Amino acid sequence: MADLDAHLLKTSRTFALAIPRLAQPTRREVTLAYLLLRVADTFEDAAPWPRARRIEALERFGALLARRAPEETAAQAAVWAEEVPCAWLAYRELLADLPAVLDAFFALAPPAVELVRAHMLRTIRGMAGYVARTDGAGELRLADLADLRGYCYVVAGIVGELLTELYLLERPELAAVASRLRERAPFFGEGLQLVNILKDSAADAVEGRCYLPAAVDRAEALALAREDLRAAAEYVLALQAAGAERGLVAFNALPAELALATLDRVEAAGPGAKLTRREVYDIVDRVNQALERDAPAVSPATWDPAPHPGLRGASSPLALSS
C-alpha cells in the first residue's frame, strides 16, 4: 500500500483524507479505482493534445485494463509520462508508475477486478464521447442542464455506482439498504462533481473547459448541487442505519460534509472560494466526534428534508438515522 498511498497523497485532496478510513480489502480496491480514474482524467483533460490523440489514449488505456500485458503497459506508460501535456508532476509520476498500479489492480480479488474494470470502461467510453465534442482548440462547451448532468454522470455518477458495488462485496449487513444506496449513488457523485465545477468554473474557463452551460443559470446549478448533497446525506445515514463499520461511514460522510461547506462558501463568495485548512480540520473532527457518539455522521439539521426529485419514495435523512 505504501507506493499506492504515495500516489494518492500527491494526486488527491479530499480522498486522501477519507480513503485511509476504509478497512482492507476495500481500502486497496478504492485506492486503485481512484488512481485508475485519475489516469483517465489526465487524458480527458489534456486539452493541448489533438482530439484524436486524447481519444486514442483513452481507448488504449481501456485496452490495458482488459488483460495483463506487462510489456505493452510499460512501453505505453513511458510514452504517456513523457508526452502527455500535463503541468502536474504528480500525474506524470502516476503515468510512469502505471505498470505497478495495473499489477496491483489485477491482483485484487476477481469480483473487485470485474467491478472496477466494467465501471472504468463505461467512464472511459463516456469521456471519449465528450472529448469527441471538443473544438479545434480542445475546448468543451456543454449545451444545457441535461448535458451538464450527463457529463457529471460519466465522470462522477458512475464512480458513485462503482464504490457502492465495492461496499456491497462481502458485507451482508448492507443487503437491506442496497437498493437505497444504489438509487442515491449517482446523485452523490453528481453532487460532488457539481461543487467542483461551481468552485473551479473561472479557472476551467481559462483552460478551455466550460462545464457550466451558458443556458444554465448559476443559481439553478447551485440548487441542483444542494439536492444531490441531500441524497448524499441519505446515503451516509443509510450506511449507518445498516450497521456499516465506522470507517466506511466516515469515508462517505467526509466528502459529503466538505462538499456542503464548500458549496456554502462558493455561493457566498463566488468561484474560486474554498475552505481554509482549519475549517477542513473542524469538519473532520465533527464527523469523528459524531461517530464516537453513534450520532448521525452528517449534520441533519443542515439538510432540507424534502426528497430529491430523482428518487422514488425517498425518506428524510432524519428518518433514516432514527
Image: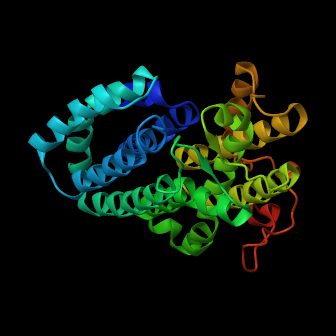
Judge by depth and name the residue closer to the eye, 219 or 230: 219
Furthest residue in direction front, as rendered? 136
Give the quadrant of the N terminus.
Answer: top left
Instruction: Tell how many labels.
Output: 0
Residue at coordinates 43% horizontally, 28% vertically from top-left?
86
Furthest residue in direction left, as rendered? 71
Give the quadrant of the C terminus.
Answer: bottom right
Q: Position of residue 37 (x, y in %)?
A: 42, 46
Q: Position of residue 14 (x, y in %)?
A: 59, 34
Report which quarter residue 118 is drawn in: bottom left
In the rendered image of this protein, does residue 301 appear above or below residue 196?
below
Q: In this image, 187 relative to 298: left or right?
A: left
- Asked whether residue 212 appears in the rendered view, the answer is yes
Q: Position of residue 76 (x, y in %)?
A: 20, 38
Colouring mode (rainbow / by chain / secondary structure / one colour): rainbow
Residue at coordinates 53% horizontally, 44% vertically from top-left?
247
Report which quarter residue 278 is drawn in: top right
Residue at coordinates 79% horizontally, 53% vertically from top-left?
221
Q: Position of residue 297 (x, y in %)?
A: 70, 47
Residue at coordinates 78% horizontally, 28% vertically from top-left?
273
Judge by depth and name the residue closer to the eye, 226 or 52: 52
In the rendered image of this protein, does residue 132 appear above or below residue 43?
below
Report which quarter residue 292 is drawn in: top right
Q: In this image, 59 relative to 12: left or right?
A: left
